[in-house]
Image (cartoon, rainbow, N blue to C red):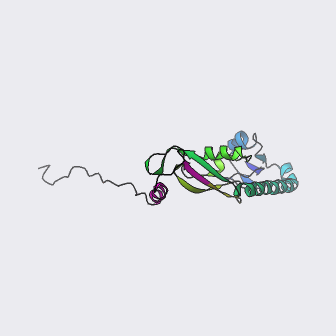
Amino acid sequence: MKVILLEDIDTLGKMGDTVKVKDGYARNYLIPRNLALPATARNLKAQEHQLRDIERKRTKIVSDAQSLAEKIAGVSLTFTRKTGEKGRLFGSVTNMDIAEALGEKGLTVDRKDILLAEPIKSLGEFDVQVKLHHDVTPGIKITVLPEEGEIPEGAMEEAVEESASEPAPEVVEVVGPESTEDEGK
């Protein structure tokens, strides 16, 4: 079934594109969620008008994302967590923690849009990207401090060195029992 996309969908295309998808996907997912319209003759004729509306909507979304990016770019967040030896955290700082902290500052960001490969588990300063739009990804500065208030001497340097130079996991080769030629004789 051919449909006209009303929203950007990463796996299909951008707003206004006419794409071919499976019938069930269109009927059960795209159309009920107002993500697409069936590409009928009537809708295709109306597509020109819709393309203008979609372009206005796309421009508004990008401008909203850029204005939010300007606000986010100036933000730096500080988290305090309990720490063990060498600056390792008990627990971690996750994208959910970052989204909540941004929400407290009046900036609404979905936690899925915070690009954090893995939770932060050590003390230090980190740069985290926020994907507001596929063209707009501002960075925010995250600082993780110990709850006790004092950083153990050398903990920050050791934590940074550990994260930069963590050895790769050791590969162990498993060898089965050695076979000899005279076993069967």
The answer to whether any part of residue 14 appears in the image is no
- Residue 118 in view: yes
Quarter-of-image position of residue 170? bottom left
> Closer to the camera, 178 or 182?
178
What residue is at 59 percent from the left and 53 percent from the top? 143
Which percent across, then down, holds residue 56?
A: 85, 56
**Residue 93 falls left or right of residue 14:** left
| In front of the other: 45 or 177 | 177
Q: Is residue 52 magenta?
A: no
Q: Which residue is at a point 52% across and 52% down the rendered structure image?
A: 123
Which span of residues is magenta-colored? 142-171
Q: Is residue 148 magenta?
A: yes
Q: Is residue 106 left or right of residue 139?
A: right
- The total number of labels drawn is 0
Please provide percent x and percent y for residue 55: 83, 57
> Which of the 4 image quarters holds residue 131?
bottom right
14 or 181, nearer to the observer: 14
**Side of 6 where 100 appears, left or right:** left
